[in-house]
Image (cartoon, coloured by chain):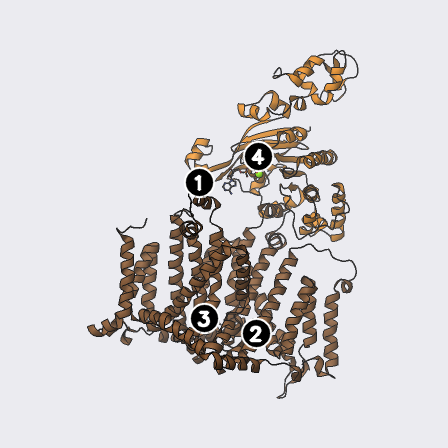
Chain colours: A brown, B orange
Amino acid sequence: MRPRLTNSGLAAWGLVLATILLGWFGRDLAKALDARWLVKVPSSWDFAFNTYISAAMTWLVEEAAIGPVSFTDATRAIAWLIEQPYELALNLLARGFLFDPGPEPQVLLPAASWIAVTAAVIALGHYCRSWGLAALVGACFAYLAVFGQWDSAMVTLASVLIAVPIGAGGGLLAGIWAYRHPLGERILSPVLDLMQTIPIFAYLVPILFMFGFGPVSALVATIIYATPPMIRITILALKAVDPEILDFGRMAGTTQRQLMWRVLVPSASQSLMVGVNQVIMLTLNMVIIASMIGAGGLGFDVLAALRRLDIGAGFEAGIAIVVLAIAVDRLSQAFAERIGQVHHTAPGSWAARNKRTVLVLSLLAVTWVLGRFSPLLLDYPQSQTITTGAFWNDTVKYLNVNYFDAFEAVKVFFLHWFLLPIKKTLLGIPWPWAIAMLTLLGWRAGGWKLAAMCGAMSALIAVSGLWAKAMVTVYLCGASVILATLIGVPLGVLAALNRRAGIAINLLIDTLQTLPSFVYLIPVVMLFRVGDFTAMIAIVLYALAPAVRYAAHGMRSVSGELIEAGLVSGCTKWQLLRLVRLPMALPEILLGINQTIMLALSMLVITALVGTRDLGQEVYIALTKADTGRGLVAGLAIAFIAIIADRLVNAGARGARIRFGLESRA
Amino acid sequence: MTLNTKLSCRNVWKLYGANAEGFLSRNPSPSGEDIRRAGIIGAVRNARIDIAEGEIFIIMGLSGSGKSTLVRCLSRLIEPTGGQVLFDGVDLLTASEQELIEIRRHKMGMVFQHFALLPHLTVLQNVMFPLTVQAAPRAEAEAKAREVVELVGLKGREDYYPRELSGGQQQRVGIARSLVTEPDLWFLDEPFSALDPLIRREMQDEFLRLQARLHKTIVFITHDFEESVRLADRIAIMKDGEIIQVATPEELVLNPATGYVAEFTRHIPRSKVLTVGGIMTAGSGGEGEPVPAAARVSEVAEQIIAADAPRPVCDAAGRIVGSIGRMAVARVLFGKETAA
Ligand SMILES: Nc1ncnc2c1ncn2[C@@H]1O[C@H](COP(=O)(O)OP(=O)(O)OP(=O)(O)O)[C@@H](O)[C@H]1O
Ligand SMILES: [Mg+2]
């Protein structure tokens, strides 16, 4: 039971008001009291976490060993295992097979011709669904060739082709382990929970340190990022297999292994494919972040262009990623659907049954042979590519010349009336007060355990010397989340109440979600240049989807009886919304906001590219300097913020559910 | 009916709840009250049955009475909390994992209420599956599978997928699959409950036809008393995890052990349950063609009523054992109570 304060509501509002006032006047107050330590943690109090962590990491890499196997041996072995298939895929798609004992490497076999690759995806599209899909993916790949993005795209595709099987396969095995052994689930489930809240950059730096700058590091980071949903979906899918099927398998006298691989996994295959699709989308989402630690390809092109502020080139590469993502996503979805359908094997020899494979393979061979005489068959001719870079640059120039004032006015308005006040307040709150408030909040929401966690984590951030940057992070994410909520929740409500609007809004959200995160950044930078406002818009666009989705879902799942009860008691439409639907949907809406916060935090390192001064930037700097300690501390600080936010919001949502009797107080 | 016992269980308990084993070892025969007070669910309580070779043994009871749980204890799909299950004299509960796999591969088959067909395999592959997991030679397995597919009347549909078949056809596949290993012991858990009445009737006939050919030992679950009467040699009635009576259908109607059993059997027309042997007048007498003692009254009622004098009754060997007249039949057909 939670203790109930008398007039607790009043007290809460009082505290909120006090916090805001303290924040607003914090600086002046500190000056007046001559106690600058109140708003700025004195640097002499900083605990040198980063030095210790750097030392620990150095020890790990240079000395740690279990018996004769040193830690470095282990990482090298992992790297080697990942590198072999990756090299193969890369050689096949992009680089060609080289023969290089001498200084002059000789091409043994060039990379697969663009014609053969495009034919292969067309064949896949036709195999998975129809000529329509074949045309779509064919067009996507042709686009990559014609618009001069082919080489980079193939590098990216090679890493996707490696990361997805490892992520999906590894996730499947881990999920099976957790399904079979209760211990496995008990170990994995908190790890998965944590992984879901920790933004990717928290572990970029240690990975960089262990595996070095290069595609392997990038693949490791991608796999770590993309695997957790697969594990979860595997566990759920296996548990959802009809118990009768399980009984049947055992009665047929299957061994443990036969039961798993011949009965359970095939029966769950449709749900498992949903997980594979997730892995694919997350892998593509990581393309640009991965290029920060050594992935080449399209992600690197975008990153390099953003660094140069070459909007045209960045936009082109960005669109190429979107195009690639669409092709791969549609193919994998169609494939998943195909698995769930009925197929009759045609009679005839292998070649007759696999006409498409035969066709693609012979095309590959023919282009390889004839390619010696006509390079056109191997590479799309450079002179025929179309570049849109100049067009985008001109467009931006035009917009900026003609509408500069309008854009500027919007930006200044938001900065002046929205962003800066929040920033000033947050930075002005004395840190001891902030820690105390968080602890109190934790206690109110989830008892002393949560209180201890909130207090400890925020105190750790304070003594790590990152308080100011953490506050900037909170401000940037907070402002974006507020905006995303203000836009997203009404959209969700509208989508739930009006069918036609619902269709349009769903389409919008689906599109937003298929786009890899950073793609939002490019057009915004084009129009508003670098700065907090740009970062905010990019975050809002990226993090909007869950706010809309959960709100719509919450509204739809309000029980019909309750609404009828409202109608019978004579509510107007508006009253019904305000008094019945919204309060009942509140727990779902809160969960959506929680997801929005998580997405906002995971967008941080990307926004560091546009010059925000937050923890994301700290990680980014650490990455460029390969400073493990610094990167890890900043990463952990982001993780702490994420965990605190996640637990508080979740506890709040649970409280609301209990209050409405949707969940019992377990 | 031979009296060779094929499957028997002694004092089988299945309790769900925290530390059910400890509870049972402290108190080896708890009453329903004890179980309830301990906060435990007694899904099967002290079950004791003997099933003879070649017998169709039906387990009946309302939903939640523990039928499925009992059958799953008999096949050890569920680990009983206590007791003994003897199959051909071997205690299944002490069998090792490997022994159990061998027994299930060769000696047991099971049919499920919702068919439990593997969606990614064709009819033929589904039927072959039990042989495939034994790594039987492919050609042999396929030949065997085609044979049973034909036996259940699905010839020509070998390459269909389960979702392309009707419910009745799917259950035929389930039956074929459970027969492909030529098991001695055949479990059927409400095999026809998911089918509509006409198809159910047809499947029951099909089942009787198969059994007449195969002579399996059968444990069959249903909650439909009419179905039990059509198919059963003996019926066990379960209530709240307990077996309250095991008897032939006729005995159940004539001598119900409790009011619950009587209530259970009340709505079935007596003429469909009672046999001529059960209501005849013993001794010799009557004239005309003898009627078999094992025949149900409903089957012969018309000819007995049409005849002017009582008809003689003969047993399976053809000896005259009694006679039956109009009045006896009329009492069964129209009377409320039969002479017990
Ligand atoms: N895993 C379990 N945990 C707890 N209780 C269970 C479990 N499985 C079954 N029970 C309980 O055991 C009792 C018997 O269930 P069982 O499935 O054997 O019934 P049934 O007679 O087959 O019913 P139906 O006709 O609905 O199939 C039920 O009260 C059920 O709630
Ligand atoms: Mg059942």
A485 relative to B319, above or below: below
- Disc 4 marks a residue whose amino acid type is Cys
Q: According to the image, label 4 marks what residue?
A: B9
Secondary structure beneath label 2? helix
Which of label 3 and label 1 is nearer to you?
3
Which of label 3 and label 4 is nearer to you?
3
Q: According to the image, label 1 marks what residue?
A: B22
Q: Are marks 1 and 4 on the same chain?
A: yes
Secondary structure beneath label 4? strand
Disc marking residue A319: 2
Q: Are marks 4 and 2 on the same chain?
A: no
Residue A47, image quadrant: bottom left
Of residue A156 and residue A595, the one placed in the foreground of this image is A595
Q: CA distance from mark 3 to mark 1?
A: 62 Å
Q: Are marks 2 and 1 on the same chain?
A: no
Residue B237, image quadrant: top right
- Disc 1 marks a residue whose amino acid type is Gly
Contact, mark 2 vs mark 3 (Cβ under 8 Å)? no
Q: According to the image, label 3 marks what residue?
A: A537
A594 relative to A253, above or below: below
Which of label 2 and label 3 is nearer to you?
3
